[in-house]
Image (spheres, rainbow, N blue to C red):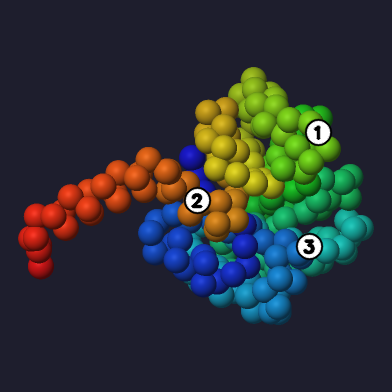
Amino acid sequence: MKFFVDTADTAAIKELADLGMVDGVTTNPSLILKSGRDILEVTREICDMVEGPVSAEVVATEAREMIAEGMKLSKIAPNIAIKVPLTWDGLTACKAFASEGLKVNVTLCFSPAQAILAAKAGAAFISPFIGRLDDIHLDGLDLIADIRTIYDNYDFGTEVLAASIRSVNHVIECARIGADIVTAPPQVIKAMANHPLTDKGLDQFLKDWAKTGQKIV
């Protein structure tokens, strides 16, 4: 499974990238707002930090304007993936970008039907949102499973990029289902290292070591 980090915080990206925990980055207008930086500047810096795809999202809602924005974003760096919403105009833009050999991440997917259309339009990535479905009392992981089955049935080349990851359990279950990628906030990825029994065992080891009176260095 590949890990994309869902943030525009370059310090957090660097920390994870140095450990080999970043295969790509996803951004969106909300994350750019949180960073407080210019979208072109911060996206260019992120692209320089990672080798994998960096999703940069258009903000237009009409296909022609999406295409203009996406073409400008694509010139930031060779590893840009243009992010478009799963609307009819978004699919139109996706087809145009894919025809030019550009990678497209189709986002805000909430149904298998939408995922089929994205694959047919040439999306490199489909981003189903788990957490937002959970918020309305639906099981977002069921959507990941449905898309995985459908894509495997027809050998679609679109990668399943599980998004709106809220917990370590989301990551584990996506791995079980066979999502190609998860994109998660830095704090969720780092939380995967935590376990109370690890903490308990380490505490005991340190207490026992202290009793030996020895030093390694």
Q: Position of residue 191 (x, y in %)?
A: 50, 50
Residue drawn 59% across and 51% down? 184
Tell me the distance, in whole angstroms, between the alpha carbons under discs 3 and 1. 29 Å
Determine the secondary structure under disc 2.
helix
Residue mark closest to the camera, 3 vs 1: 1
Mark 3 residue crowding within 10 angstroms, few (<14) / some (14–19) / many (20+) = many
Is there any visible trace of residue 16 in the rendered image?
Answer: yes
Percent coordinates x, y for residue 136 in the rendering: 83, 38
Residue 198 lies in what quarter of the image? top left
Q: Amino acid at mark 2?
A: Ala
Residue linked to disc 2: 191
The residue at which mark 3 appears reads as: 58
Of pointers 3 and 1, the one earlier in the residue sequence:
3
Nearer to us in this view, 105 or 209: 209
Is label 2 or label 3 in front? 2
Q: Which residue is mark 1?
A: 137
Q: Residue at x 64, y 52 (%)?
A: 103
Quarter containing the C terminus? bottom left
